[in-house]
Amino acid sequence: MVAEAIDVSLEESRSALAGGGLDIDAAEKLVENVIGTYGLPFAVATNFRINGADVLIPMVIEEPSVVAASSKAALMVREGGGFSVEVDDPRMIGQIQVFVDDRDNARRGILDAAPRLMELAARTDETLVEIGGGPTEIEVREVRGDGNGDGFLVVHLVVDVRDAMGANTVNTMSEAVSPLLEEITGGRIGLRILSNLADRRRVKVSADIPAAALAIDGFSDDAVLDGIVSASRFAELDPYRAATHNKGVMNGTDAVILATGNDWRAVEAGAHAFAARDGTYRPLCVWRRSDGGALSGFLDMPMAVGMVGGATRLHPAARLAIRIIGSSGVSGLAAAAGVAGMANNLAALRALATEGIQRGHMRLHSRSRMLER
Ligand code: MEV
């Protein structure tokens, strides 16, 4: 069925997934000292409608009920027209640390030289520039330190990395501009590395769900809706709860990141740093009652994903996962990871606010396994 929906032959999809999708030769191209490969379930979540199009979502995860819960929540969202998603241009930030005494003067020098610095960075990846990407901006931030003279400047080199996750590109560019930065500032260069707080590259998801679509035995539709809004407020007001709330979001998001061969540590690091951006750890997805009496959800988080490097290219199952999501490119991939996060959060809060997670999720798990038989 999945093979038909994505126009892949059954044989092709079977061979992409055989043996966990990765043979020893491919594994050795990825990392060092390989002694085997390690399998995880590869599943497909259904019912997702994203910006008016139906999308199947591949998930790799070991936790029971995440796939069933996502699919069920996606069906509820579908009742209200589906997920609306905006994905930022794929801009990543390279950080170059500069130790210099006269920071004001150094800052002015760096900003005056911004076109030269960007030109130098662009020369390291002319192909990227040809396809419409490349450096877009130079920013200078001052980190003051604790008053013992340990402050410094941080230069942010913002790069549109197109279809890549961008770590390699940005790291190469950050190193390439450093000698010129040293010359301009007369300072000393410290670290040169990408920032995983990818806040220029976010996915924003919204959804309106009619109360009737949330129905659950023994509870009025309005009670379920109010319970979800109250659970959202709990996470907004208490970091202990926000951590668990966001773990539910990441259940869905990470499963897509892993299926598509992307760097889930990078997405995790970005998500949690973003969640704590104003000094308090907060939920990545919040829920409200809309004026029309529906449940409105909003998710906003960094999503640094690519489809051209590393495992996304070398892992046959990751390539299949990217095909399952469809032809919408890297922004479609970011959208899929975002909606999977929101769907999981909705399913978890609906269960928690009513019959409890154990009963609801375990029932979903056994039901979906029976369906497979
Ligand atoms: C379990 O993997 C995830 C949940 O704890 C998320 C939540 O509490 O919102 C159910």
Image: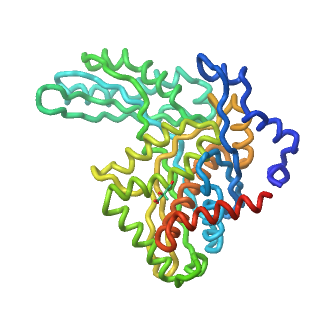
Above or below for 356 versus 240: below
Above or below for 325 versus 190: below
Quadrant location, the C terminus:
bottom right
Horizontal placement of 95 versus 61: left or right?
left
Q: Residue at x 52, y 37 (%)?
A: 160
Above or below for 68 versus 62: below
Quarter of the rendering containing residue 157:
top left
Between 213 and 291, the one nearer to me in the picture: 213
Q: Position of residue 244 (x, y in %)?
A: 42, 55
Between 52 and 261, the one nearer to me in the picture: 261
Q: Position of residue 356 (x, y in %)?
A: 50, 68
Q: Position of residue 279 (x, y in %)?
A: 27, 50
Q: Residue at x 58, y 50 (%)?
A: 63
Q: Name the colour scheme.
A: rainbow
Quarter of the rendering containing residue 15:
top right
Quarter of the rendering containing residue 260:
top right
